[in-house]
Amino acid sequence: MHIIGPELGLTLPGMTIVCGDSHTSTHGAFGNVAFGIGTSEVEQVMATQCTLQHRPKRMKIEINGKLGKGVLSKDIILYVISRISSSGGNGHFVEYAGDTITALSMEARMTICNMSIEMGARGGLIAPDQTTFDYLRGRKFAPQGADFERAVADWKTLKTDDDAVFDQVHRFDAADIGPMITYGTNPGMGIRVTDRIPTLAELSDLSEHASFQKSLDYMDLRPGSSLLGKSVDYVFIGSCTNARIEDLRLVADFVKGKKKADNVEVWIIPGSKQVEKQAVEEGLDRVFREAGFELRGPGCSACLGMNEDKVPAGKYCVSTSNRNFEGRQGPGARTFLVSPLSAAAAAVTGQVTDVREMI
């Protein structure tokens, strides 16, 4: 749903979108209210087109400045979550703003909004602008012709007032963001790939000690150690976070003329049949095949261990998905969350790598 809705023009600014999946927040990239709901709430919506909700608090996350080499939108959101924690957005709806955000493509914006739920937020959105309108123009279910121009005139009004008041505001400098990687078992346990895993003494909240140590025990990692050079077994490039054509193009461009490391199995999972078709038409499938990557059928695949595509117990997987919980990619599987570019670097080197050294 989170890939197909936008690419078909079903997702439009100003809508309220709900789905029985927490990553429905993806659609907020178009300037709408989008959030996941439970099974009984789905029943309410199907019967009445309404659902009863508590009003969330308002949070603004503002990021300004130019991103560094090798830094993608996935790194932005992993950085933000590492700073405010996986529960820092509890009870809030988030608006992402700042010139770093407005400079992003629609697909990159979807990646950021997709992971709003990973900081505990109800959802996240970005105000629609010319980038939004250009993306939607001509898509199958979007308004056409004069109707589209009238819709754009309305969509341009869907932005936050300059004097709007937020319950929380967080501001970050894009220059502080590097290629990110998680080391634990929630998306908030993340570091720049060149940093070291924190020690117990560096944790600000003493109540986190037990869960922190439990996470590292599961991942078989030591506090204070570096992940650079850590050997990995699988690389998974897919999920509703990073399985759009832009993601596949980035990976193909990086790996063209290169080969995967012998110790790694690499899976590329398009987010939809349309993405798969585009990848084949553009020859990306050939690039992946020559690099030793396996282009598999569209879907969720190993983003979550609910189907045949699982990472075996004890194996390390560098993944572009959105969750690294215990058993998320299979019972006993160990997941490092990264951007598509960092995943491609790991696929080629067979280990956790700072992609900036390769571009």
Image (cartoon, rainbow, N blue to C red):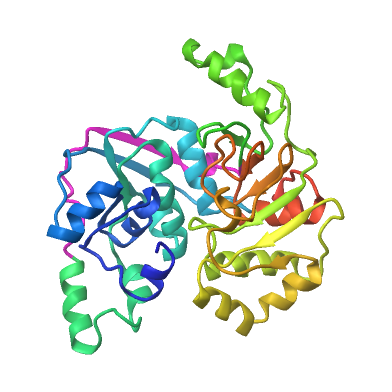
Q: Is residue 340 above or below residue 195?
A: below
Quarter of the figure with the C terminus: bottom right
Task: Provide residue 344's location: percent of width, then percent of height.
Answer: 70, 57
Tell me where residue 326 appears, x and y as whole percent: 58, 34
Asked if one can make out residue 95 in the rendered structure from this viewpoint, the answer is: no
228 within the magenta span: no
| Residue beneath the point at 66% across and 38% down | 334
View extreme (bottom): residue: 145
Residue shown at 15% from the left, 59% from the top: 47
Depicted 18 relative to depicted 257: above or below:
above
Residue 155 position, x and y percent, is 20, 68
Residue 269 vertical position relative to residue 92 in the rendered view, above or below: below
Is 330 in front, or is 101?
330
Q: Is residue 208 above or below residue 21?
A: above
Q: Quadrant of residue 278?
A: bottom right
Is 336 placed left or right of 151 in the picture? Answer: right
- Where residue 252 sits, quadrant-wise, is bottom right
Point out the stretch of residues depicted in magenta.
157-180
Residue appearing at x 72%, y 22% in the figure: 222
Please say whether residue 52 is visible from this viewpoint: yes
Furthest-right residue in view? Answer: 262
x 20%, y 62%: residue = 14
Q: Position of residue 145 (x, y in %)?
A: 23, 89
